[in-house]
Image: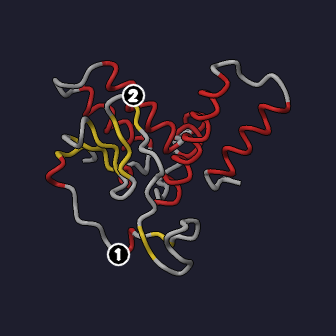
Amino acid sequence: MTVRPKSSLPSPRPEDLVQATSLATVGPGHWAYRQPSEALSWGRWRLNLGALTLEFNGGDYYVDLESCTTSAEVLDSLCQIAQKTWATAEDLGDLLRALDALLSPQARLCSMGVERGPVKITRNLIDAAARHTRAHRRWAGETAGRGFSGPAEWRRLAELEREEGLR
C-alpha cells in the first residue's frame, strides 16, 4: 500500500542520505539531505524530498514514491486516492500531474502499454525531476506562456536548468 496516514511515516534511514556536492554550506564528502530551494507543489500535494513522499494538505496523507516502482503500483496509488471522500477531482488530477513530473511513468514504467518496471526510485532521480520542474516553471513564468519564439528562449531555459544543477 502506498497511501498512508502521515503517522505511519518511517524515520529516515542512513541509506536515504545523498552526498551533497552542490550545496555551498556543505563541503564535498559530507552527507546531508538535499532539500529543494523552493517547495514544489501541485495543488494541495507537496513534495517531501527528505521522505520521498507526496504529502496531501500538510501531510494528512502521503504517497510513498519509493513504492511506485511499477505501473500497477502507481495506478493503485491513484485509485486509493480516488476512493477517499475528501479527494476532489482536482486533487486527483494534481496527484497525477505530480507523479508524471516526478516519475515519468510513460517513459519509465509503461511505455507503449508494456510494463517496464520494476524500477528503482531513488532520491537523486526525484531530486533531478524536481529541479527540472522548478526550472521549467520559472521559464514558463518568465515567458508568460509565449513558448519558444527563438534562440534567446532556448538559452534562457538552458541557463535556468544550469542554475538548478541540471547541465
Pick the front one: 31 or 61? 31
| Above/below status of 49 relative to 144 | below
Name the mark on residue 14: 1
Residue furthest toward the bottom? 29
Residue 125: give x, y in percent of width and height: 53, 55
Q: Secondary structure at mark 1?
A: helix
Name the mark on residue 85: none
Which quadrant of the rendered structure holds the C terminus?
A: bottom right
Q: Residue at x 65, y 51 (%)?
A: 163
Residue 133: give x, y in percent of width and height: 55, 40
Its colouring scheme is secondary structure
Q: Residue at x 56, y 52 (%)?
A: 128
Residue 61: give x, y in percent of width and height: 21, 41
Q: Is residue 8 left or right of residue 64?
A: left
Earlier-in-chain disc, 2 versus 1? 1
Question: Disc 2 marks which amino acid?
Answer: Asp
Q: Residue at x 39, y 28 (%)?
A: 94
Q: Is residue 85 left or right of residue 43?
A: left
**Residue linked to disc 2:** 94
Q: Which corner quadrant of the image does residue 52 belong to?
A: bottom left
Question: Disc 1 marks which amino acid?
Answer: Pro
Q: Secondary structure at mark 2?
A: helix
Q: Residue at x 74, y 43 (%)?
A: 158
Residue 28: give x, y in percent of width and height: 56, 78
Residue furthest toward the right? 151
Q: Is residue 61 left or right of residue 32?
A: left
